[in-house]
Amino acid sequence: MVFSSIPFLFFFLPLCFLLYYAVPYGNRVPNRWKNGVLLVFSLIFYAWGEPVYLLLMLFATLVDYTGGRLMSRFGTSAGRRKACLVCALAINLSMLAFFKYADFFIGTVNGVFGTSIQPLGLGLPVGISFFTFQTMSYSIDLYKGEVPEERNYLTYLTYVSMFPQLVAGPIVRYAKVNEELHGRRIVWEEVQEGVLRFMQGLFKKVLIANQIGALWEEIRLLEAGQASVATAWLGAAAFTLQLYFDFSAYSDMAIGMGWMLGFHFLENFNYPLYAVSVTDFWRRWHISLSTWFRDYIYIPLGGNRAGVAKHLRNMFVVWFLTGLWHGAAWNFVLWGLYYGVLLTLEKYVWGKALESLPKPVRHFYAVVIVVVGFVVFVFDDMGALGLYLKSMVKGTGNTLWGWECLWYLKNYGVVLAAGAVLAFPVYPWLKKRLAEAGRGGRFAPPLRLAVSCMALGGYVALFLAATAFLVNDTYNPFLYFRF
């Protein structure tokens, strides 16, 4: 089940929140009943597509819960506590490796040694990359004494399985939601803000990401000899915008539903296409993943404090794992190393020179790198990747411009323009200016009322438009289900 679907929007979500708000707070455990409702609906949500993998998630949570209980029982016995941590991490990583990378490993062995080992053909459990990182973060933080032990397994299962963030993040750490799991309150002003944030994500997903994605699919499927340089770059830009709006929209919807439930998830995107360097881009893109690798891999390895050679090693390890985390294919590894090399060059070679350039030039530099990077990201066939990159440089038949590019711009120009504008912090700027205008002058109350009515009407119109698209369109992918 995806957030941008009719069953979720008109059946699952309304019923969930109706029951969630109806049940009272418990007397002994403040959120016992609300946690119960959230847990039941989260398990239904996860089991909707492939019920058998629900058992896998239950097993994973039981492993880390049991490991945490044992770590607390062993108290100051460092050796036993470490053994519990190592066992929990080994089991988590083994499950992730088996389901996500077994066929990748078999294919690599077959390619290198000429063997014919039959792939397992296992389906990828939805969200396994996300909830595995969550369960591991709990075990690591508990071992380091940074979070308290969770004594109630159902509460821990509620933390891992919360449907807003289960299948696509943000990667929520136990330390962030521990207090809210046990003592949150519903604040109706935040519920209203959560509804608006959810709707913004829905509009981004259905009205922008899906429509731009259709353009990318058309260009991607062009036969050899039909794509000019301009068309190839247009397709690459379209996929970049599709992926950004697709994933950031899901994060918006997750954060909005979190507010409606009384939780406060961290922001996962901060207008990454507004970045002025590769370093700046990775401070803004998929923030929960970047900080996870920083805190649990990069810093424990020594970060940049152990000399240049070890720093380069640490960068290589982190970006190799970042690429591999995204998928079991060599293009993801190449994509991770691509950014590792560029980040290293920015730090040690041209970073200072880059900072001296005008901001528009730095922004152009960052966007070009990001767009090329996402071409590497999207093609798991190395031959197809090479041909597409070649078409971005010299086109097919050395053609820089083709009439097909004008046709695509004519048919998709409006949604491309909307995506290009909304990828920048235009909405926060406009919202701030309207708020400032509403606070001053004798016309402030009428202005506030007019703005509120216009905003409400706009949300209703956009929701109706999004619903119409969902009813009529068959193209409604969620790209991060692959990862």
Image: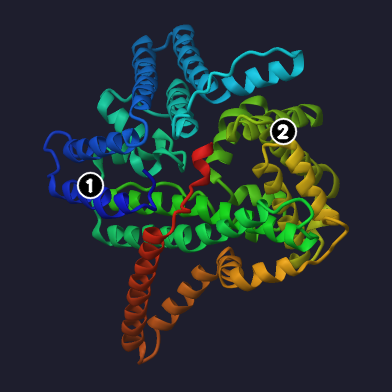
> Where is residue 38, by image quadrant?
top left
Q: Amino acid at mark 2?
A: Met
Say which of 16 and 440 sits in front.
Answer: 16
The quadrant of the image that shows the N terminus is top left
Residue 197 in view in this figure: no
Instruction: Of the two numbered discs 1 and 2 on the same chain, state the one appearing first in sequence.
Output: 1
Label 1 to label 2, Cα distance in Å?
43 Å
**Residue at image coords 40%, 38%:** 166
Check disc 1 and report the residue beneath it: 16
* Label 2 residue SS: helix
**Residue at image coords 27%, 30%:** 155
**Is residue 320 toward the left or the right of residue 188 in the image?**
right
Say which of 463 and 200 sits in front.
Answer: 463
> Where is residue 318, by image quadrant?
top right
Query: Which x, y percent locates residue 248?
Result: 50, 53
Q: Residues within 10 Å of mark 1 (few under 14, many from 20)?
A: some
Q: Amino acid at mark 1?
A: Cys
Say which of 453 and 458 sits in front.
Answer: 458
> Where is residue 142, by image quadrant?
top left
**Is residue 382 toward the left or the right of residue 7 in the image?**
right
Q: Residues within 10 Å of mark 2 (few under 14, many from 20)?
A: many
When the figure is inspected, residue 476 is found, relative to residue 456, above or below; the finding is above
**Is residue 417 toward the left or the right of residue 70 in the image?**
right
* Residue placed furthest toward the right: 398
**Residue at image coords 48%, 49%:** 477
Check disc 2 and report the residue beneath it: 315
